Amino acid sequence: MRVDFRIIAAAKPSIAYARDGVRFFEERLKPLGKVELRYVKAGSSEEVSARLLQASEGCLRIAMDERGENWTTREFESRVRRWQLHSVRHVAFLIGAADGHTQALRETCDHVLCLGRHTMQHELALVVLLEQIYRIHTLLAGSPYHRD
């Protein structure tokens, strides 16, 4: 069973490199699997967190936050395989705005995941997450893109 990924982020990317990176990975992902990008209106941390939770109802939720777990690519792949085995249909990655997520959002999510221990600009986080999802799809397909 395929897992559909949904990335829900605060506001569309406004920086050129982020817009280009998003388009690049959206095109590369099209033949490999479903990845849906949704954007919620920016605002305060509380407002954005509420919008992200509402937009991710019914999904396994993963908050993207520098305080989260730091999965390797292989650990990420292993989790996706387990989700497939356990019939998890929809996984939502939640990317907040500049002020980050509320504690309540982090506690509501199934996982809190970081892309490294440093704080990352949210538009860059979106591009990095898309690359990792692309990488996972290539691993699942047996493609040589990833090298250990």
Image (cartoon, helix red, strand yellow):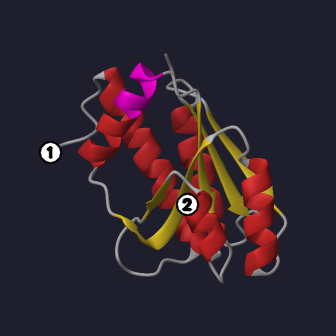
**Residue interval drawn in magenta:** 80-86
Magenta portion: prevailing SS class: helix
Give the residue displayed 28% in from the left and 23% down from the top: 142
Whether residue 11 is visible: no
Residue 64, position as x, y percentages in the image: 52, 63
Residue 144 locus on image (x, y percent): 24, 31
Count of labels in the image:
2
97 and 82: which one is in front?
82
Task: Relative to 136, say whether 50 is above or below.
Answer: below
Tell us which disc is closer to us: 1 or 2. Answer: 2
- 81 magenta-colored: yes
Type of amino acid at the residue the image marks with label 1: Asp
Label 2 sits on residue: 63
Q: Is residue 132 magenta?
A: no
Could you tell me which secondary element the residue under label 2 belongs to?
A: strand
| Quadrant, the C terminus | top left
Of labels 1 and 2, earlier in sequence is 2
Where, by quadrant of the figure, is residue 96 drawn? bottom right
For the residue pair 40 and 24, the one nearer the viewer reads as 40
- Neighbour tally class for label 2: few under 14, some 14-19, many 20 plus, Cα within 10 Å: many
28 horizontally vs 114: left or right: right
Residue where numbered disc 1 is placed: 148
Q: Is residue 129 above or below residue 106?
A: above
Give the residue displayed 31% in from the left and 31% down from the top.
139
